[in-house]
Amino acid sequence: MASHVVGYPRMGPKRELKFALESFWDGKSSAEDLQKVAADLRSSIWKQMADAGIKYIPSNTFSYYDQVLDTTAMLGAVPDRYSWTGGEIGFDTYFSMARGNASVPAMEMTKWFDTNYHFIVPELGPDTKFAYSSHKAVSEYREAKALGIDTIPVLIGPVTYLLLSKPAKGVEKSFSLLSLLGNILPIYKEVIAELKEAGASWIQFDEPTLVLDLDSYQLEAFTKAYTELESSLSGLNVLIETYFADIPAEAYKIITALSSISAFGFDLVRGTKTLDVIKSASFPAGKYLFAGVVDGRNIWANDLAASLGTLEALETIVGKDKLVVSTSCSLMHTAVDLVNETKLDSELKSWLAFAAQKVVEVNALAKALAGQKDEAFFSANAAAQASRKSSPRVTNEEVQKAAAALKGSDHRRATNVSARLDAQQKKLNLPILPTTTIGSFPQTVELRRVRREYKANKISEEEYVNAIKEEINKVVKLQEELDIDVLVHGEPERNDMVEYFGEQLSGFAFTVNGWVQSYGSRCVKPPIIYGDVSRPKAMTVFWSSAAQSMTARPMKGMLTGPVTILNWSFVRNDQPRFETCYQIALAIKKEVEDLEAAGIQVIQIDEAALREGLPLRKSEQAFYLDWAVHSFRITNCGVQDTTQIHTHMCYSNFNDIIHSIIDMDADVITIENSRSDEKLLSVFREGVKYGAGIGPGVYDIHSPRIPSAEEIADRINKMLAVLESNILWVNPDCGLKTRKYAEVKPALTNMVAATKLLRTQLASAK
Ligand code: GLN
Ligand code: ZN
């Protein structure tokens, strides 16, 4: 029985690649230094998998930045603005596309399916010239071979590559990217020929777009591509790998009918229905099934007994020698190695498996199927599963009861939004076009030092509190000077908007090295939600009350919403996600009510990540949106009409979920807008009825550029053309924590000036 791993994290157990990349970019080390770190990482990963007994070890899953960009380099599809003149693509051109250079901005980045990984979007058009320009796949294959390891080279499949591309600047939006298939296949043929020559006997094409809702034209492209490649592929075993969701029956039919393909990889963790598809539609005789039973998206130890049951059932369908045990997707979406977690206790650790441990699990399952079950390993695993089920750390009956009691109610505020806004206005007495900011103010080096020293017990609690209060006071005074209407405290006590709450809630654990690549050299370290969530005590009331006491203007309480906390954490897999979300919602609800009781009249509950939890398949989206929006409403359904609830979202493409956003029933929503105002405002132009307060961001906080007052006034005018002046708020796109005061002060000065200008114009127009 064989084993396989779809892909492996590249960053290294201690983010070695990150530091090597950043040092190279800063000019502090040479290209050779970077290449050396990369080669060492690759060889240690290959050896680790070989030692674990994995039969099909992937190569070309390493990347200096991103695997889609690597494919763009392979195809030579470099946009003209990078002035590349041909030949093998080097670091200069490659990193210019990824990060921009002094004269040209970077290519666009977008989320890789429903993960938190971001890839560089290829820009293609009818004039794009393709040429084989990066031999990375072949050189990595050879590199492993030289180490004595025969790998399975991985390529992004041609159809997925095109489906993830966008029309280049100046190319019609309606341009059919799939029409380029015939242009890129010759390059794939060259790569395949070289891989064969180098000795490869297998090749893996990642075609994850197969799990999306594709139309028949898109599906046909797979048949076209792999039929066209058939003669090049002859003599090779070819694996089509899919992941992140069920494979739809239609797509399954099409790919299993391809004669050039000998193996199919499916995600059996997220794809809960794929098993039924395999059982009911017949599996092609003589072909391999790569069964993704070990979860690549989470950090939990596999339930080996359950997986073994699934595999045994599959074995009767596909045959003993044709079943390969695999991961559900690349392990790059999980943390790297549990060995480096020195702060987690041993019980919790026994419940977890990071990438290195998952490799061992895959092999243990394969051996068990082959009749060589490692009894000790299996029984340790069973004991850990049992302890996780029964541990009092996991279960909190009170929380379970409270969450169960939520059923059957919608949790809506008693009064409708326009009546609430009237009641709030009587109390808050805000000018028309009220101004506010999203929450955080610049995080200075000094602030980070204070937080770090407090955590390390190097300064006393009193010193810490004084330092933070001083910072809040500075931010409050600044906002008063700027004449902003609804103030924020600036979030100086927070390192991260999820971690800050997770650390104070029970049911959360934190890793030291549990990093996951987000994009390029950037990694995130998601908290682990392992148990029922509760809030032992108030989390923000102390700081918000202190801030409110410094000003007569309304001070916004600032919370992270339940859906965002959920979507930016590793979530327990022993209960549905929505149940965990409801528990977090109840904890946040208590905080909202404590803030209200402490006299905070405006409370913002950020849901920056609500959209990114949207399932890939349309058929599952309504259910998600329903419980996500419900969770948000739970947090604030109990407040008085006069308490104003804000929410904030960091994305503008919400046109397709606008009705869910309205259904959140917040009093005011602030939303990113300035990078794509046409897109956002078009919803309202198309006649969607919107009665709550809304603050589409008036300038981009991602850029150091300072917008002029005229430019901001212009933006507000565009908004006034589609939204009533009495619901419009004026604010930046997002929090200011990544900016410098030298940028924030003039930008906000201009924002307030623009608002005042428009107020005068509105008053005289009456
Ligand atoms: N309140 C948070 C801040 O201003 C919101 C951050 C976010 O939306 N990502 O930093
Ligand atoms: Zn934001």
Image (cartoon, helix red, strand yellow):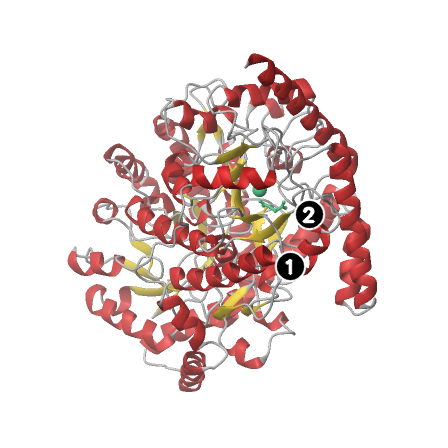
Tell me, yes or no, if residue 306 can be seen here.
yes
Residue 190: x %, y % from top left: 44, 37
Residue at numbered disc 1? 541
Q: Could you tell me which residue is drawn at 45 percent across and 84 percent down? A: 380
Residue 194 against residue 124 in the figure, above or below: below
219 left or right of 729 in image: left
Residue 185 against residue 18 in the figure, above or below: above
Closest to the observer: 157 or 590? 590
Q: Are marks 1 and 2 in contact (CB under 8 Å)?
A: no
Quarter of the image that includes the C terminus: top right
Pointer 1: residues within 10 angstroms few (<14), some, or many (20+)?
Answer: many
Pointer 2: residues within 10 angstroms few (<14), some, or many (20+)?
Answer: many
Residue 556: x %, y % from top left: 62, 47
Closest to the observer: 621 or 629? 629
Q: How many marks?
A: 2
Residue at numbered disc 2? 21
Closest to the observer: 523 or 92? 523
487 left or right of 243 in image: right
Q: Could you tell me which residue is drawn at 64 percent across and 66 percent down? A: 512
Badge number at residue 157 = none
Q: Could you tell me which residue is drawn at 70 percent across and 52 percent down? A: 19
Amino acid on which the number 2 mark rests in the picture: Leu
Residue 1: x %, y % from top left: 33, 71
What is the spatial separation of the Cα atoms under label 1 and label 2, in whole angstroms? 41 Å
Tell me, yes or no, if residue 189 can be seen here.
no
